[in-house]
Image (tube, helix red, strand yellow):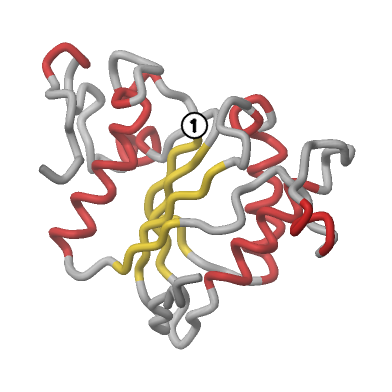
Amino acid sequence: MTAYRRNFIPGGCFFFTVNLADRRLGLLTEYVEVLRSAFRETRERHPFTIDAMVVLPDHLHAVWTMPEGDRDFATRWRLIKSTFSRNFAAGEPVSASRAAKGERGIWQRRYWEHTIRDEDDLARHVDYVHINPVKHGLVRQVRDWPHSSFHRMVRLGIYPEDWAGDVAELGASFGERS
């Protein structure tokens, strides 16, 4: 197995993608209040700032800023995932390795993390977070997806309500590397 190394920077800003193990399920939007509660509980004990976030049926994207001197986003994700999972009766399929460790099978074990390098990188990732429901064909306009920090940013005057227009105006690869 590859020795993957996370970039733990105290007080850093990070982009995350976190997926359900079974991407065919829609648990995250179906039980969005349970997910919100898991985030609230975790943030009470281990504060962090959610700069941007979108919850889709089978995965979520988030941009977080860690508190000064704190770099432990891994504990926060572990707590969010486990708190969410405890709200469901066990019974989902699990691999032999997960069963041996007493793990549930709701979430993928790992998550994607990217360290935000500068203001331009932050802006690109926040835009990517907000355009994601359109990219996945869930809505035609960003403002139509309810589970997004986009609405907060509109209220704050950061985005206009009609930001990104209609899906027909976008290229199919918006936000993706060419």
Give the residue at mark 1.
56
Residue 20, horizontal then vertical, whole percent = 59, 41
Task: Kindly indicate the quadrant of the structure image that contains residue 30.
Answer: top right
- Expressed as whole percent of the image width and height from the top left, the position of residue 71 reads 48, 80
Q: Secondary structure at mark 1?
A: loop
Give me the residue at 63% from left, 53% from top.
Answer: 39
- Residue 58 as seen in the image, left or right of residue 13: right
Q: Residue at x 60, y 49 (%)?
A: 108
Query: Residue 56: horizontal and vertical position, in percent?
Result: 49, 31
* Residue 169 relative to residue 92: left or right: left
Q: Is 12 above or below relative to 61? A: below
Q: Position of residue 123 (x, y in %)?
A: 20, 52
Pick the residue in front: 74 or 31. Answer: 74
Would residue 73 appear left or right of 79 to someone viewing this image? left
Residue type pointed to by label 1: Leu
Q: Is residue 134 left or right of residue 112?
A: left
Q: Quadrant of residue 4?
A: bottom left
What residue do we see at 24% from left, 42% from top? 127
Q: Quadrant of the C terminus?
A: top left
Q: Residues within 10 Å of mark 1 (few under 14, many from 20)?
A: many
- The residue under the point 55% across, 33% down is 58
- Looking at the image, is 101 positioned above or below residue 32? below
* The residue positioned farthest toward the bottom in the image shown: 69
